Image: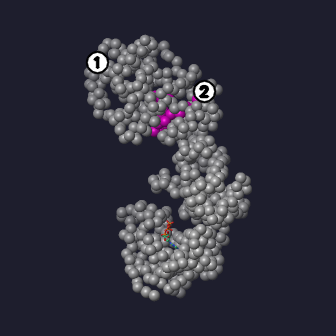
Amino acid sequence: MSTAVETKEFQTEIRQLLDIVIHSLYTDREIFLRELISNAADAMEKLRYTQLTGPEVKDKDAVLEIHIDTDDNSHTLTITDTGIGMTKEELVENLGTIAHSGSKEFFKHLSAKGDQKDLNLIGQFGVGFYSAFMVADKVTIYTRSYHQEGESFTWESDGVGSYTITEGEDRVRGTKMVLHLKEDAYDFAKEETIKRVIKQYSSFVPYPIMVNEQKVNTVDALWTKNKSEILDNDYNEFYKFIANAHDEPLLRLHFSSDAPLNINTLLFVPKENLEQFGFGRTEPGVSLYCKKVLIQEKSPLVLPEWLRFLRGVIDSEELPLNISRETMQDSALISKLNKVVTSRFLKFLDGQATAEPEKFKEFWEKFNFFIKEGAANDYTHQKDLIKLLRFESSNTEAGELVSLADYTGRMKDDQSAIYYVNGPSREVIESGPYLEVFRNKGIEVIYTYAAIDDYIFGAIREHEGKRLISADEADLNLGDTEEQDRREEALSEEEVSNLTSWLKEVLGSKVTDVRESKRLVDSPAVVLSPYGTNSMQRMMQMMNKDLNNVGPSVLEINAAHAMIKRLDTARKNEDSFAKIAAEQIFENAQIAAGLIVDPRGMVNRLNEILERALG
Ligand SMILES: Nc1ncnc2c1ncn2[C@@H]1O[C@H](COP(=O)(O)OP(=O)(O)OP(=O)(O)O)[C@@H](O)[C@H]1O
């Protein structure tokens, strides 16, 4: 057997990461043990899965247990598992490069200077295996992969710059890690310390943990236990374990059912939505089990994509143990499971809205985007998702939310539709022209701030028999009770007809139509989109990145407004200023609609207007 020692350099990123880890004064450094235990458990989970689905593994009778041995004399801590182990290539790839998630995120957020903030990142992301170097000045790993062929290897490093790999003596499948503790970490060679740390962080690891040959954890599949036997703290610790989280969950749902499927489910909504913080797309986090055996970790199939923020476990006795990832894709059972659990979770959320409105509000503020994503795309659950939607409205204070049911519940008897209007904020919507007629008639209007809201409303079109109508819809048909009456002081119908024809001529291709408005009270004019709603036009403008080309609008004028009446007088007098005023009135209305107009033309025009105003 060759015993040649190969020395390899750590990848630059790993070197930098290790430098911080080694010199860190991170207060919770005991979490290193949780990281190593969870790696050991992962390795055994992978082995178990391979055993169920793949070819025969090496040492197939080796018991799946984690052994932790403390040696207070030589100041070492040894963690041994019988998991899948690592080949030489895997040692290099997994422990020498920055290929995996936790350390990658950690690295992304490192500051250039290396400051206190970086230390907190250790807690936030976990640096996985590398955290061992917070307590050890040398780590030796003995490992043997589950493949029938192949050798055992020894990996060793002091965490500074490089590591060595040596072909080792043949050993049983799995991995043994020996931590040579730093002087200030000798405490971790004491049995009491290790037991305390395990109890705190790793109680729910699904494999026996033996400290100096004594079993210390309870190996509980918490989700199969009776709710009445579980304490809040048990749930929270379990959540932290499976979600790799450091805080408590926002919501949890634990339910069991026998029909239509036998299911034990434990789901958690995390405290924070990381997508909201710009962390990229959240990966699904609910694992699929059959009678406590892991079938698929963090399954992308067992729940719809828009529920990817959930963490937890779904266990169903009905699943065949040997279901493969390929057959899972089109398994009728998985779709049924998906449907049942999703419906149950939506029912739970709906219940939360009544039972714990404040909590639900917090959930809504952080996770509403996922619910909307579902409401827009998931036709199976659309009805239940729509029930959960919340909005501000013209009847609420800022920050207070209403559901569609709240809205329809207090609609006037003769009101024919549900009205909504899109805008970037409450202030913009309330100062714009679109609300005027509704305010005047005392009709509630829902405020939507996200483009996806309009997309959803456009897609569902109706709620409880009432049409959903955007207040800036071009052919808004308000019906008798909702329409604005013609005012006495308004221009005559003949004058309006002449003025609108003239405006069409002046504005040319910028308008598809000019007409008298039935919705304006205080504003002189309003633009509407010939494509449906202004928000759609705004979106098209953003998507085409053609900000100088708004596309044509429909212009509606307020025939009773003093400015419009004066415009008509100027037109009749063939005053050349009438044309300039008309163009400015039109662009003002476009700006009020949130559309972006070409500022260059406008500046010249405004200068002309100012010159005239200043005499
Ligand atoms: N005991 C072990 N047995 C087999 N492979 C291991 C073991 N410990 C670590 N590894 C391998 O090394 C890789 C890196 O481990 P590390 O703890 O740094 O990150 P991770 O566990 O993948 O990610 P994270 O900690 O972010 O969840 C693992 O993905 C795994 O492939």
Q: In which quarter of the image is residue 320?
A: bottom right
Is 481 above or below relative to 229? Answer: above
Which region is colored magenta?
417-435
Residue 41 at least partly seen: no
Of 463 and 60, nearer the camera is: 60
Asked whether, in this view, residue 412 is left or right of residue 186, the answer is right
Is 92 above or below relative to 345? Answer: below
- In which quadrant of the rendered image does the N terminus lie? bottom left
Please tell me whether residue 190 belongs to the stretch shown in magenta.
no
What residue is at 42 percent from the left and 38 percent from the top? 540
Task: Name the colouring of the figure.
Answer: one colour
Q: Which numbered disc covers residue 415?
A: 2
Q: Distance between the residues labelled 2 and 1?
A: 45 Å
- The residue that label 1 is drawn on is 576
SS at mark 2? loop
SS at mark 1? loop
What residue is at 57 percent from the left and 20 percent from the top? 480
Residue 431 place in picture, x, y as percent: 46, 31
Residue 79 place in picture, x, y as percent: 55, 78
Of 291 and 533, nearer the camera is: 291
Mark 2 residue type: Gln
Q: In which quarter of the image is residue 539?
A: top left
Residue 532 place in picture, x, y as percent: 47, 31
Q: Which numbered disc covers residue 180?
A: none
Residue 604 at least partly seen: yes
What residue is at 47 percent from the left and 68 percent from the top? 127
